[in-house]
Image (spheres, helix red, strand yellow):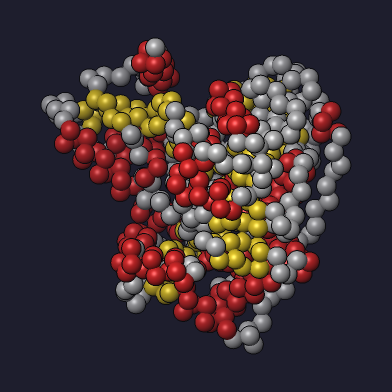
Amino acid sequence: MDENPHYKQRDHLTYPEATMFQMVQSIAEQFPDEPAYEFYDRKTSYRCFVRRIERAARAFEASGIQRGDAVTICMPNTPQALDCFYAINRIGAVANMVHPLSAQTEITHYLNVSGSKMILIVDLFYEKVEAALKDTDHPVTILTCRMQDELPVHLKALYLLKKGKDYLKFPRKPHILWTDFLKRGNDKTITLPEPSFDPKRTAVILYSGGTSGKPKGICLTDLNFNACAMQAREAIGEEFRKGFKMLSCMPLFHGFGLGINLHTVLIHGACCILMPTFNNKSYASMLRRKQPNFIAGVPTIFEALLHMPQLDGLDMSFLMGMFCGGDSLSVELKKKIDAFLREHNASIQVREGYGLTECVTASCLTPKDNYREGSIGIPFPDTVYRIVKPGTDEFLAPGQEGEIILKGPTLMLGYLKLPEETAKTLRVLPDGDTWLYTGDLGMMDEDGYVYFRQRLKRMIITNGYNVYPSQLENIIDSCPEVSYSCVIGVKDPRRMQRVKAFIVPADGVDPTDELKERIMEQLRLHIAKYALPREIEFRSELPRTLVGKVAFRQLEKEEEANTQEAAS
């Protein structure tokens, strides 16, 4: 069962020996005047995009950034972030991608573990990043960009009036304005190195959590991203070509956003409509005004579509593809979304993908016209799935549940500076190939359709982002007023899961609202906003397993029962 029937029907793909920048450059030579991206009605052609990349690349060269050096991008989806990403790739440096809502201590960790020499941020995050630099173990230069620099004139004035005026002044060091930094790239006598493809070179570092709760850097290559983009186009079954548009709402610090929403679109000559943030009003406005051909997002975004009165009466026949990833799409929600699409004259259905950052993003997708209820689809071309008995390398037959493992050209090089963690996740089997052990339970049917069941690893997914309970518990338990805690995910109709913390106060400590706030203050210092508990419940004790561990699954069952009771 190495390859399912659907997989055999597809031709194996040929992946060029090219960097990500070279793939974009090649498209720019074919379609120089087509828009590469659009930001609040301001379009940038592929020709101009490459010029912007080369200018930024020269600025990095002039600043001493060399091949193999790391530069952190801590940005939402803006033109500066996109230019910077491909400029870093252009000179063979490493793009270290960080969530801009990361906590101060998390940013310090990301800078230290990657050895980043520079960090690109947007102005409103300057103070947090400046504070994070106080604990770095090496010098880091802050490059600060401003949203208004990329806005059309009429929107620039409005932005300055509302927000921009608050971020016009900065300390001189270690800060440099992105616009001033780019002036270093005006010197065209600076010779850029020839792009050099190396399938074993770390080009991008994305972050995911681990069983220890500490974020792990995932080292990915040019080949990983290019292969993912080419596979995705084949799996989608629709042309990504000039004139087509993707509403790029998923963020570029997320594998789904960077791999599918951006790179897949750009290397096929289509246009990315950049959205720096998501809210119902702006998303509905973009759908109405821009009429994108493709949209991709997490279940939370598509659930929100059902509650946008701005979309009433909108003919959405312009949609050619809707792709959901980052979290499991329930059968019930898929039915609601598909009904919404039919009501709005769209001839498509939402298609669910599955993947991990360890293989860039999606590696499996439901077929266009062959949906099977509960299935996450069939593997991408050149990607092979297997099911093994948990804790072993024993292959299981179709219909049997076990751990999902996979192999293909998108597998990461490994975890940054974590060889033991890498060895647990990437394993060479008797066939001589390296397989990725996902830590997810599932099964495959006789036809090769994959079914996701649950995560073997303890993890919460809220709004498409991974939250690691042990990381929160370590911080909560460090509070002197706390005896111990347990953090779980509770089903939520909007976020899929919300974070809830159960806390046993220390002896003699009263479980007051003031104590809750002190605990939250400690969490805010170390944990990103999206990962913070939405609810704290104090208890005198928590259930235990036979070996004395907190029985978090029992708490999960209690919450599920409470939710069902409330619903009835």
- Taking depth in this image into account, of 268 and 302 the one nearest to the observer is 302
Q: Work out whether 343 lies above or below 553.
A: below
Query: Which residue: 34% across, 72% down?
Result: 168
- Taking depth in this image into account, of 238 and 411 the one nearest to the observer is 238
Q: Position of residue 15 (x, y in %)?
A: 80, 53
- Name the quadrant containing residue 448: top right
- Taking depth in this image into account, of 68 and 563 the one nearest to the observer is 563
- Taking depth in this image into account, of 204 and 373 the one nearest to the observer is 373
Q: Position of residue 189 (x, y in %)?
A: 64, 87
Query: Which residue: 60% across, 32% down?
Result: 343
Name the quadrant of the C terminus: top left
Q: Work out whether 410 lies above or below 104.
A: above
Name the quadrant of the N terminus: top right
**Quick check: can you spot residue 421?**
no
**Quick check: can you spot residue 159?**
yes
Q: Work out whether 446 lies above or below 177.
A: above
Q: Position of residue 100 (x, y in %)?
A: 43, 54
Q: Is residue 416 left or right of residue 317?
A: left
Q: Is residue 529 left or right of residue 416?
A: left
Query: Which residue: 75% across, 30% down?
Result: 369
Query: Which residue: 59% across, 86% down?
Result: 187
- Name the quadrant containing residue 388: top right
Q: Position of residue 273 (x, y in %)?
A: 58, 56
Q: How many marks?
A: 0
